[in-house]
Structure formats: structure tokens, C-alpha cells
Image (tube, grey):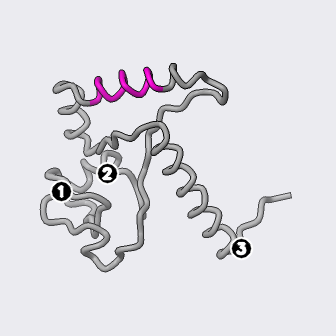
Amino acid sequence: MFSDVVTLLTQFRSGKIIPLAITHRTSELPGVPTLAEAGFPNLDVNASFMVVAPAGTPGVVIQRLNTEINKVMKSPGVAWKLAAQVLIPFFETPEEFAATLKKEREMWASAIRRIGIQPEP
């Protein structure tokens, strides 16, 4: 099962669920190997929480939002709360974020085609 860690952290800590691998190393789950260390170097699946804006939003607004959101995410209080919930922030430029979204779309589209998933009529 793939899940964001925060959803299952209580069960991990209580021993009700045993994590087999995680996407990124975290101090909250010491000793749990990453997917790459567990033998799956090409498996890159992450639960994501993203901030997006409507198409056509002026670039200057996008840049300002990116700057301010990154600043807040790096503030000690917010950074501590993110770390405590095993939420690992990625600080990307808007262009890098667009490339990440494109890569994820292509990855999932390929998987859907390979598996043969079809929409219901």
C-alpha cells in the first residue's frame, strides 16, 4: 500500500502496521529503508500537497506566491510541524514544479495504458 506517512504514523508507532519502505529517509521512521534501498530504485511515488493557480495567472503573481509560500514553509514553526508529520517539502521554482507535474502525468498515463484501465461508460 502506498500512503502518505502522516496518515499511518500512529499505526507505525504502535506496531499495528510495519512499514516496509519509504520514499525519503525520515527520522520519524528510523531504520526503514527507502524504496531504492529496498530494491526499487525506479519507483518514485509520492503523496503530494500542492499549491496551484488558475491558468493565465500573471507570472509576477506566480513568482510572488512561490516566494512567500517557500518563506513560510521554511519558517521554524512551520518547518517543525511539517517534519513532525513527516511531510517533506520540496522547494521548486514554478518551472520545476511544472516539469514535475508533467513527469507525473506521463508516468501515470503510461501505467494506465500498460494496465489497460478504461473509463466506465
Circle 3 residues within 10 Å: few <14, some 14–19, many ≥20: few
Which residue sits at x=31%, y=45%?
6
Give the structural element (helix, strand or loop) at label 1: loop
Percent position of residue 107, x then y: 56, 64
Residue type at mark 1 is Leu
Marks 1 and 2 close (CB-CB < 8 Å) = yes
**Image-based side of 40 in relation to 62, left or right:** left
How many numbered tags mark residues here? 3
Q: Which residues are magenta?
A: 63-73
Of the residues tagged 3 and 2, which is closer to the observer?
Answer: 3
Q: Earlier in the sequence, mark 3 or mark 2?
A: 2
Instruction: Give the numbered dot on residue 109.
Output: none
Which residue sits at x=69%, y=71%?
113
Answer above or below: position of 83 versus 32.
above
Q: Earlier in the sequence, mark 1 or mark 2?
A: 2
Q: Which residue is mark 3?
A: 116
Q: Which residue is mark 2?
A: 5
Which residue sits at x=32%, y=61%?
23
Circle 2 residues within 10 Å: few <14, some 14–19, many ≥20: many
Residue type at mark 3 is Gly
Give the structural element (helix, strand or loop) at label 3: loop
Q: Which residue is mark 1?
A: 29
Marks 3 and 2 close (CB-CB < 8 Å) = no
CA distance separating discs 1 and 3: 35 Å
Percent position of residue 119, x then y: 78, 59
Percent position of residue 40, x then y: 36, 76
**In the depicted view, which residue is nearer to us: 18 or 33?**
33
**In the depicted view, which residue is nearer to us: 98 or 28?**
98
